[in-house]
Image (cartoon, rainbow, N blue to C red):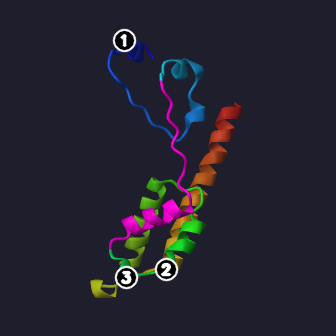
Amino acid sequence: MQELDRFGGVVVMTTNLFGNYDEAILRRVARHVEFALPNASMRERIFRSHLPSIGRVSADLRNVAMSSRGLSGGDILNVCLNAIHAASVDPDPANWRLSEDTLLAEIRKVQAGKKAHEGRTAEVNLN
């Protein structure tokens, strides 16, 4: 905090855990900008932007987007990268196909991780 007090420039801080900051830090932050999580339509566009070979995707991305409620753009990127990796197991790249089941499985993993993290955060804040 002393470094923040001495620094004369602009500091940009980002977090997904805003509630974990104490009042001393928050007093030093002049502006707070909240970015809401993407809605279903935005999530579908994010999925489309992270799946460059859409011809190799056998998934209803509208359904996938609906199933990914609560995920951020970064979470969706991780889902796509992990799903693409999981779908790239055939020795012949021409056979690589990404299924809806694979995408949904990766979404469930991220959602489970977020839920587990929320539980740990609540425990830390209670003590």
Magenta-colored span: 31-52
Pointer 1 or 3: first along the chain = 1
Q: Secondary structure at mark 3?
A: helix
Q: Secondary structure at mark 1?
A: helix
Name the amino acid type tagged 3.
Answer: Arg
Q: For mark 1, what is the residue? A: 6
Eyeballing the image, is 19 above or below 112? above
Q: Identify the residue at image location x=58%, y=32%.
A: 20
Q: Identify the residue at image location x=52%, y=42%.
A: 16
Q: Position of residue 67 (x, y in %)?
A: 59, 67
Q: Is residue 92 visible?
A: no
Mark 2–mark 3 Cα distance, whole angstroms, equals 9 Å
Mark 1–mark 3 Cα distance, whole angstroms, equals 53 Å
Name the amino acid type tagged 2.
Answer: Ala
Query: Quick one: label 3, few (<14), some, or many (20+) residues within 10 Å?
Result: some
Q: Identify the residue at image location x=49%, y=38%.
A: 15
Residue 40 highlighted magenta (yes or no) = yes
Q: Identify the residue at image location x=44%, y=62%.
A: 46
Q: Secondary structure at mark 2?
A: loop
Q: In the visual, does 116 lie left or right of 13? A: right
Q: Is residue 30 visible?
A: yes
Q: Position of residue 10 (x, y in %)?
A: 35, 23
Q: Position of residue 47 (x, y in %)?
A: 44, 66
Q: For mark 3, what is the residue? A: 56
Mark 1–mark 2 Cα distance, whole angstroms, equals 53 Å
- The C terminus sits in image quarter: top right
Pointer 1 or 2: first along the chain = 1
